[in-house]
Amino acid sequence: KRETFTAHAICLADNQQSVPPSLEAKTQLTAAGLGEKSITFGQDDDALDVHNTVVEYFPPLEQSGYEMMRLTPRRQLEILRVPNGDFSGFNLRRALNQAKLYLRPIKYCLSVREDEQQSEPKQRPVLQCDACGQHIVQADLRDHIRTCPLATSTESPPPASRARSSLPERSLNV
């Protein structure tokens, strides 16, 4: 059986950052797909396996390069030191112990704007406005209904959804 360990990792956006992100910054990082994630590494992974796992969870790091860091007792981030720069699974686990893994980009800062992320487009639920028939992303539906010229303020559900149940009625013989 393959021995593994899990590291709690957070990808930073700023390539000069030397302190952990604030709560507000963590929220931005998460919205941009860079926030904290639990990553499982193999104890016997070589440095390339570890790298491939990191960029699988944080794809922007593949182009920017990254440094692996941990928090010091003085609340500063320090670059992990491993023998011969070999970030194998074994060395990474020893260097982290139980600490959180911070991944800092090297070449440039990463975008924290959701619309600039290069990830796959996210699937979001879309509903049809009963008044005008336009298809609206569910998260925007309430605002649309407020501004839709054909919607009334007391919209009723369409007849199909008013039915009490889709189960057949049972009659009781007493």
Image (cartoon, helix red, strand yellow):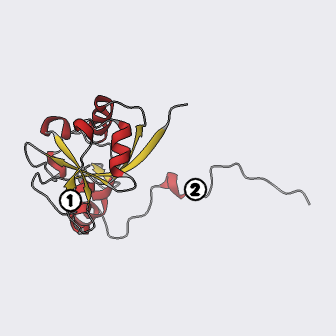
Res. 21 image quadrant: bottom left
In depth, the one of 63 and 160 nearer the eye is 63
Residue 111 location (% of width, % of height): 13, 50
Label 2 crowd bin: few (<14), some (14–19), many (20+), radius 10 Å? few
Q: Is residue 135 above or below residue 162?
A: above
In depth, the one of 93 and 163 nearer the eye is 93
In this view, the mark in front (1 or 2)? 1
The disc placed on residue 125 is none
Q: Is residue 20 left or right of residue 37?
A: left
Give me the C-alpha separation between circle 1 and circle 2. 59 Å
Q: Quadrant of the C terminus?
A: bottom right
- What residue sits right under mark 2 in the picture? 163
Q: Quadrant of the N terminus?
A: top right
Q: Give the residue displayed 38% in from the left and 52% down from the top.
A: 97
Q: Give the residue displayed 38% in from the left and 38% down from the top.
A: 90
Q: Earlier in the sequence, mark 1 or mark 2?
A: 1
Residue 117 location (% of width, % of height): 18, 44
Say what secondary structure mark 1 lies in: strand
- What residue sits right under mark 1 in the picture? 77
Q: Is residue 164 left or right of residue 45?
A: right
> Residue type at mark 1?
Leu
Residue 131 location (% of width, % of height): 31, 56
Q: Are marks 1 and 2 in contact (CB under 8 Å)?
A: no
> Residue type at mark 2?
Ala
Q: Is residue 120 visible?
A: no
